[in-house]
Amino acid sequence: MDLTDILEGRCENVLVRQEAGADRLIFVFSHVGYPAGKFAMTNVFSDSTLRANFVFVNCKGNAWYQLGINDEFDSIDKCTQLFRRLIDHFTPRQSLAVGMSMGGYAATVFGLLLQLDYVTAFTPEVILDLPHCRSVTLNNVRRFDFKYISLQHLLAANSHTIVNAIYGAYDLIDLSLLWPLSHILERAEGKLRVTFCNDGHQVPLSLDVRNLVKSTFSVGCLEPRDIRAAIVLRTAHPAVELYALARARHFKNVGDFNAVHDVLTGEPSFSKVSWINFFLAENFDKAGEFDRAAAQFDLAATQDPGSFYVWFRSAQFAERTRRFDMLSYTCERALAIKPGDVHASKLFAKALAA
């Protein structure tokens, strides 16, 4: 398959969208669940305000791009060569890669290999094949390219690409996988910026992704103030918190709820961190201690009242445990943040009908 085939849409794993006069090139990597011919974020980047040509990419088998994108471009290295040909074709003034989860990993690895100007990666795994991580549990193939299981060496070697990694603070798996990067979080320097928004593992509901990408072209390294609704680690020693979250995730996966509680209450400062209280609420819920779970959800929401995610998850808990006063209140708070949300509106209707 030659470059003309790619540009004219004859590759079901690559979609090129060209804009007359564009001087930017944006690679958009899909997360899991997209079949051949379908691509993530096509609706997000549906207009011409960014003055960019777009390359939308997916891969078969939810294989985390470890086997490339198809039978011809069947490795990360071969895909890198293909994408470099596209860069040479478009000769952009600025270049960026973006993606979420599996796509966030792909945006990071290819952005670094291609030495693009910027990477905007939502909830990326920068080390694959760790126990209970999504690159294992949401991977139909589970074969890995040993050169790119960890991206730490690429991050260290690349002095050009600015990587903005944005994580949802309310996802235990994502936060627990960040422990090996805690030294970077503490220094907050160099080409990697790690920030947190008040969502879970998803393209953040609280962010306008298109405007965030536009801001990246303007300012480069995104600081928390550049990301609307962003929150940052509030403990004095992020490494202590991230190590505790890694242990808590392990105990959660083996069903040891008492150990999860002990770990998440092991430091006095943890009681002031909204996402740790959120994880404690989930732990009480799993253990069947619903009264304690309800109180903990309320504490987490009080500490982070602007988070739609926390109010909505609290509402889901209230609906499942038939706490209709709590359901009504949490839905009202969620809908105040995101008016008209379909899922929150349905839960609110259940509360009103109870």
Image: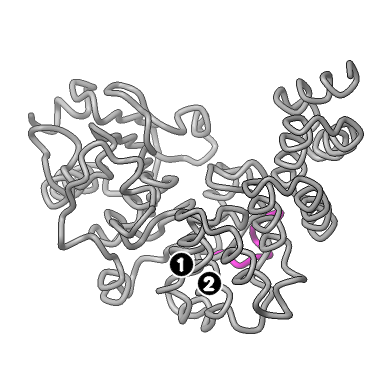
Along the line of sight, the residue nearer the viewer: 108 or 332: 332
Residue 312 sits inside the magenta stretch:
no
Q: Residue 25 appears in which quarter of the rendering? A: top left
| Residue type, numbered disc 2 | Leu
As drawn, the label of residue 71 is: none
Residue at horizontal 76%, vertical 45%?
290
Q: Which residue is mark 1?
A: 178
Residue 12, percent from left and from top: 23, 23
Label 1 amino acid?
A: Leu
To which residue does mark 2 refer? 242
Q: Residue at x 11, y 47 (%)?
A: 78
On the image, the x and y values in percent for residue 171 come to: 56, 53
In the image, residue 249 lies at what x, y percent? 50, 60
For the record, the magenta segment spans 222-229
* Mark 2 Cα shell of 10 Å, populated few (<14), some (14-19), many (≥20): many
Instruction: Examine the rendered structure and indicate whether residue 346 appears above or below residue 130.
Output: above
Answer yes or no: do the residues labelled 2 and 1 have beta carbons within 8 Å?
yes
105 w.r.t. 3: above or below:
below
The residue at the point 44 percent across, 70 percent down is 192
Q: Is residue 281 left or right of residue 133?
A: right
Q: CA distance from mark 2 to mark 1?
A: 7 Å
